[in-house]
Amino acid sequence: MDAIVVMGVAGCGKTSVGEELARRLGWQFLEGDGFHPPENIAKMSAGIPLQDEDRWGWLDTIAAHIVLAKEAKAPVVVSCSALKRRYRERLSAGGTRVLFVHLDGSRDTIHARMALRAGHFMPTTLLDSQFAALEPLEAGELGIVCDIDASPAEIAARVSSRIARAA
């Protein structure tokens, strides 16, 4: 496996789980939000949902980092919403083997979590657009779904044990 992308809607815990998973695996962690161009951050900060056209360059940048990790034989864990199948296909292009870990939870749970976080550019008003865009993992996609009913450490432990069993 070249990379694990921890995916899901805003506020589901991608960064917290991704950081812990990377630590457990001894892999580098890449924060997907850090690759957004300033225009995307400005749009989201203003409560404007991103469109496909806004996301392509961002996804291509993340995919390029995954390819570099593969070439360096240094797998990475990346946090990235990867809401649509075509986004996930874009992230796993270039012959990379990417496992998608979908952090799944109810709108109410995630909204409550988003309301508690401070200093993040993504407002709670965009949560419904995230759920509307979300295409759950489908047959044929390399991925697992994890409920967000536990702490990030517990979720990362579940994921790493599932990866170990599958390896």
Image (cartoon, grey):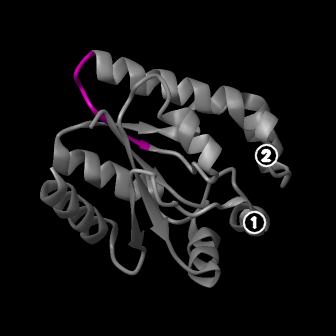
Which of the labelled discs sits on residue 132, or is there none? Answer: 1
Taking the spot 17% from the left edge, 40% from the top edge, the residue there is 26
Which of the labelled discs sits on residue 50, or is there none? Answer: 2
Say above or below: 144 vs 55: below
Say above or below: 156 vs 83: below
Q: Residues within 10 Å of mark 2 (few under 14, many from 20)?
A: some
Q: Residues within 10 Å of mark 1 (few under 14, many from 20)?
A: few
Residue 131: percent from left, percent from top: 69, 67
Taking the spot 57% from the left edge, 34% from the top edge, the residue there is 90
Taking the spot 44% from the left edge, 23% from the top edge, the residue there is 65
Mark 2 or mark 1, which is nearer the start of the sequence?
2
Which of the labelled discs sits on residue 148, or is there none? Answer: none
Q: Quadrant of the N terminus?
A: top left
Q: Amino acid at mark 2?
A: Leu
Say above or below: 144 vs 109: above
- Closer to the camera in the image, 99 or 23: 99
- Give the residues drawn in magenta, as a range: 72-78
Residue 81: percent from left, percent from top: 57, 51
* Image mark count: 2
Of helix, strand and loop, which one carries label 2? loop
Residue 107: percent from left, percent from top: 64, 79
